[in-house]
């Protein structure tokens, strides 16, 4: 089950998003300010973050920048959900590391579709690389092993 963290100070919006996502089988957690949002990101390690920009204690853009600067978190997909509709706000959000940007009011169906798309892009490829056979030599990219006539070879990096 995918875990989604919502960092949003409007309790009504949190309820709408939570209901929509839980109905689709997602595990949902929420916080209401930027500082506790950062703490929960580090504690929960969610699969996706839905982030408002205008938050108490720590603005959403600062949360986004902090996540992108953290090596352990920088791959976390971030969807900004905000009332800021100006092109400049969208550009800044995306340039600071957001993966998507949705403005309020929003459609729950569209938000769900965007969440699914972000999670799909974040999944590792399902293809397992098959061993490569060249004459008597066998290379297995998945296990990083090389064999000659079925006997393992020890190679340097």
Image: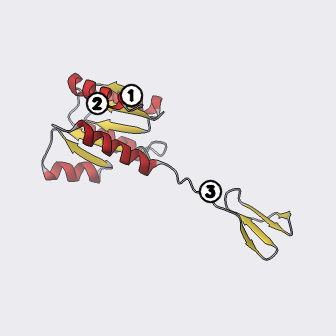
Q: Which x, y percent locates residue 152?
A: 84, 62
Mark 1 residue element: strand
Hey, which residue is sitting farthest bottom in the picture?
A: 135
Give the residue drawn at x 42%, y 43%.
76
Categorize mark 1 by other alpha carbons within 10 Å: few (<14), some (14-19), many (20+).
some
**Mark closer to the chain start, 2 or 1:** 2
State yes or no: discs 3 and 1 in contact (Cβ < 8 Å). no
Q: Is residue 62 visible?
A: yes
Mark 2 residue element: helix
**Mark closer to the chain start, 3 or 1:** 1
Which quadrant holds the C terminus? bottom right
According to the picture, the residue beneath numbered tag 1 turns out to be: 28
According to the picture, the residue beneath numbered tag 2 turns out to be: 17
**Structural distance between the alpha carbons of marks 2 and 3:** 35 Å
Q: Which x, y percent locates residue 43?
A: 46, 29
Q: Which x, y percent locates residue 57?
A: 26, 28
Is 35 rendered above or below residue 150?
Answer: above
């Amino acid at each position: 089950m995918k875990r989604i963290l919502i960092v949003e100070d409007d309790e009504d919006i949190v309820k709408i998003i939570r209901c929509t996502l839980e109905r689709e089988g997602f595990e949902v957690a929420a916080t209401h300010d930027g500082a506790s949002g950062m703490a929960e990101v580090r504690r929960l390690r969610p699969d996706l973050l839905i982030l408002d920009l205008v938050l108490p204690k720590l603005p959403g853009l600062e949360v986004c920048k902090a996540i992108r600067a953290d090596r352990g978190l920088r791959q976390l997909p971030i969807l900004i959900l905000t009332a800021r509709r100006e092109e400049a706000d969208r550009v800044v959000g995306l340039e600071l590391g957001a993966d998507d940007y949705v403005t309020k009011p929003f459609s729950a169906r569209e938000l769900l579709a965007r969440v699914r798309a972000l999670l799909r892009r974040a999944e590792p490829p399902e293809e397992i690389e098959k061993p490569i056979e060249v004459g008597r030599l066998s290379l297995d990219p998945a296990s990083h092993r090389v064999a000659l006539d079925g006997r393992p070879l020890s190679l340097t990096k």
